[in-house]
Every structure is written in C-alpha cells, then in structure tokens.
Image: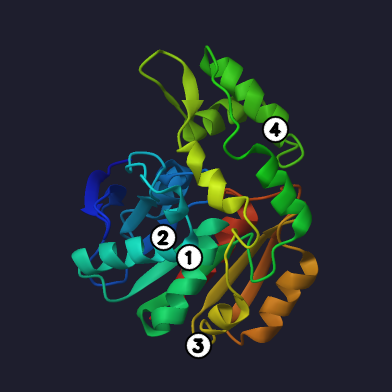
Amino acid sequence: MTWTDGYWWSNDGLRLHYRDYPGPSDRPPILCMAGLTRNARDFETVAARLSPSWRVIAIDFRGRGESAYAKDAMSYVPLTYVQDVEKLLAELSIERFVSFGTSLGGLVTMLLAATGHARIAAALLNDVGPVIEPAGLDRIRGYVGRGGAYPTWIHAARGVAELNADVFPRYDLTDWLAMAKRLYRLSSSGRIVPDYDKKIAEPFRLPGGEAGIDLWPAFDALANVPTLIVRGGRSDLLSAETASAMVARLRLATLVTVPDVGHAPVLDEVEARSAIDALLSRVA
C-alpha cells in the first residue's frame, strides 16, 4: 500500500491527521471514518483493494491515531467531529465524496448529509443507524477509556481476543494480532497502549452522549443518495429491525448482513466486498 500522510487544523487549533491513498481526480474520493476508539488504520484493507481505482482518504478523528488530543474532553462529540470533517473538505476543495462510516463514522456521515446531502455521492453505514441498541451501548461504555497497557504485542492480541471473542468468533491469533496493531500503539515507555485519548469516554458516558440528537431526520437526508447499510449478523448495536426500517425508508438503500460477525464488520468480508463494489458502481 502507498499513501501520504496529510494534516489539517481544526477550528479550535488541533492538528488532525489523515491518510491519503492515490486515485483518479475525475471521480469523488472515498472518505473513511472509523468507530469510537478506532483510527485510520481500520481501513487499510479497504484502501488496499480500492486504491488506485479510487482515491481513499482515511481520517483520524481528534484524540485518535496521529491526530492531536483535545484539551476539552467535551469536544469529543459527533457535532464537533462534523465540524472537523467540514474543515478538511474545505481545505482539500472536495465538493463531492463517497462516505464510508463505521459506527461513530456512520453517525458523522448522517450528520454530514443533514448539512449538505447533495455533496455525498454515495454512503456506506457500517453497523450503525438512527437507533442504537442499549445493550451495545452498555458494552461499549464498559470498556471505552479503560484499556490497560501490555508488555508485548502477543499480550495485546490476547487482550483484544478476550474482549471481542463474541464479535469475531472465527478469528485466530493472527487475526487478533492484526487487530491489536490497528487498535494499539507502542508508547515511549515501551508498553503497548490503546491508540486514543481515554478522555473520549467522558462525553460518551453522559445521557445522549452517543449522538445527542434525533438521527432519523439526518438519516432521511440520504433519501436521494445511493446508500449501503452493512450489518453484522451478531451485532448488538444495530438490530435487524432497525436495519430493515432503514432500508424501507430510503428508496436507494440496500442492506447486506455479514454472518458470524458482531459490531462491526471490517469490510473485507466477501459479502461486504461485493456490496461495496455494487455501491460504487452506482456513483455517477
């Protein structure tokens, strides 16, 4: 894989990071946004497959990966992330884009649609919707901001496996090690630590902290946008009922369920790959 590291500044003075994978300039780029504790590395396999046929931009939200940590923990909320992304789009002069959003990134996708749906050429909502299941929220609140440090990558991989065994029941140690290297980083003290600011948990644990607003109107802003909803068959965050309601609500929406995966699919599964290719074929 080949990419360049890019940086931009938020409205409140944070230096934020993205990976820019090369692709043609005559079609909209794909903007990839990860989940709550994740970062741009989550989209390595997606970018490797789609670039250079598509330009792929994978961002680190504030407080994750190579982006700066915020002084004010209360800025770790979806509406601020939207402002950060708006600033990047303006800086890169991107007028239209395809949005790939996993979990939190899907919430940001919907909010971006609400502020200017015409610029979204297509959207992928990965295991998230306007209704978030309480069981999934409780599980996430139980671990976010509480990850420990590990002496080696193998220890980190085993820790990730213990936490996610129900999400990816078919994973082996190689898979868990790859996931650990996307989730963790090597600290200056030589320990393996989570690659995010633990303060992101503070607003998330408040009532409504997962979004803060009714997301159905934001979701409805995708009415004229080709939209792919990806759901993990074992998901505890996006129910089958909500996913069905989403498809029924948007005339251009399709749904694919990835079997034997919880929250959230990594988008390199056979079912997800085929659905992504079908979605991109609809981009005008």
| Residue 224 or residue 62, whichever sits in front | 62
- Rounded to the nearest angstrom, the CA distance separating label 3 from label 4 is 38 Å
What crowding class fits label 2: few (fewer than 14 Cα within 10 Å), some (14-19), or many (20 or more)?
Answer: many
Query: In the image, what residue type sits under mark 3?
Result: Asn
Residue 131 % position (x, y): 69, 69
Residue 43 % position (x, y): 45, 48
> Which image quarter: residue 218?
bottom right
> Which image quarter: residue 68?
top left
Note whether residue 117 is visible.
Answer: yes
What crowding class fits label 4: few (fewer than 14 Cα within 10 Å), some (14-19), or many (20 or more)?
Answer: few
Note whether residue 92 is visible.
Answer: no
Query: In the image, what residue type sits under mark 2?
Result: Tyr
Residue contact between numbered discs 4 and 1, judged by CB atoms under 8 Å: no
- Rounded to the nearest angstrom, the CA distance separating label 3 from label 1 is 18 Å
Residue contact between numbered discs 1 and 2, judged by CB atoms under 8 Å: yes
Secondary structure found at label 4: helix
- Rounded to the nearest angstrom, the CA distance separating label 1 from label 2 is 7 Å
- Rounded to the nearest angstrom, the CA distance separating label 4 from label 1 is 25 Å
Task: Single out the mark in the foreground, 3 or 1.
Answer: 1
Q: Is residue 104 left or right of residue 166?
A: left
Task: Single out the mark in the foreground, 1 or 2.
Answer: 2
Tell me the residue that label 4 is attached to: 163
Q: Earlier in the sequence, mark 4 or mark 1?
A: 1
248 w.r.t. 141: above or below = below
- Rounded to the nearest angstrom, the CA distance separating label 2 from label 3 is 24 Å
Q: Which mark is residue 108?
A: 1
Secondary structure found at label 3: loop
Tell me the residue that label 3 is attached to: 224
Task: Single out the mark in the foreground, 2 or 3.
Answer: 2
Task: Single out the mark in the foreground, 3 or 4.
Answer: 4
| Residue 59 or residue 178, whichever sits in front | 59
